[in-house]
Image (cartoon, rainbow, N blue to C red):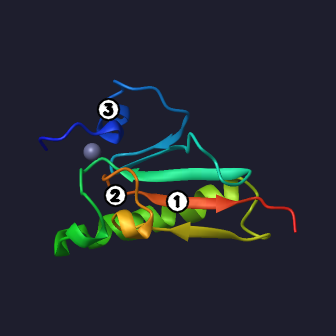
Amino acid sequence: MSEHCIFCDILNKKAPADIVYEDDLVIVFKDIRPQAPVHLLVVPHKHIRSINELADEDRNLVAHMIFVGKEQARQNNINKSGYNLLFNVESGGGQVIFHLHLHLIGGYVR
Ligand SMILES: [Zn+2]
């Protein structure tokens, strides 16, 4: 990639983040501007701009992101109360960092 990417910096440990999980395919860290008591980002090691740029070979990666989100919801005790798993796509969809990521948002008291 030619553009500077803060998420790639975090993946390469060149920028700080509050990392809660990492495996061969993804990293999970806390959103720096949380919109709920639990607000985590599931970020693939592979730099993909957005959902629009997904290739057929990325199917298993995206499925893995969702399963990691599910497991993080359980570990944060919001699986029963409920949560959002959300992809923002491009600026009009609210995407701010153009490196694919899945938001896990929950923990509201209702
Ligand atoms: Zn990146």
**Quarter of the render that holds ligand 1:** top left
Residue at numbered disc 3? 9
Considering only vertical position in the picture, is 46 above or below 84? Answer: above
For marks 1 and 3, the one nearer the N-term is: 3
Name the quadrant of the N terminus.
top left
Q: Is ligand 1 less than 8 Å from the beta carbon at label 1?
A: no
Q: CA distance from mark 2 to mark 1?
A: 10 Å
The one of 51 and 89 positioned closer to us in this rendering:
89
Q: Amino acid at mark 1?
A: His
The one of 70 and 8 positioned closer to us in this rendering:
8
Mark number, residue 103: 1
Relative side of 4 to 41, left or right: left
Tags 2 and 1 in contact by the CB under 8 Å rule? no
Q: CA distance from mark 2 to mark 3?
A: 14 Å
Residue at 45% in and 63% down: 94
Residue at numbered disc 2? 100
Residue at 46% in and 53% down: 42
For marks 2 and 3, the one nearer the N-term is: 3
| Residue 25 position within the rendered picture, expressed as x and y whole percent measured from the top left | 33, 51
Mark 1, secondary structure of its residue = strand
| Residue 6 position within the rendered picture, expressed as x and y whole percent measured from the top left | 34, 37
Residue at 36% in and 63% down: 91
Crowding around mark 3 (Cα neighbors within 10 Å: few <14, some 14 to 19, many 20+) is few
Q: Amino acid at mark 3?
A: Asp
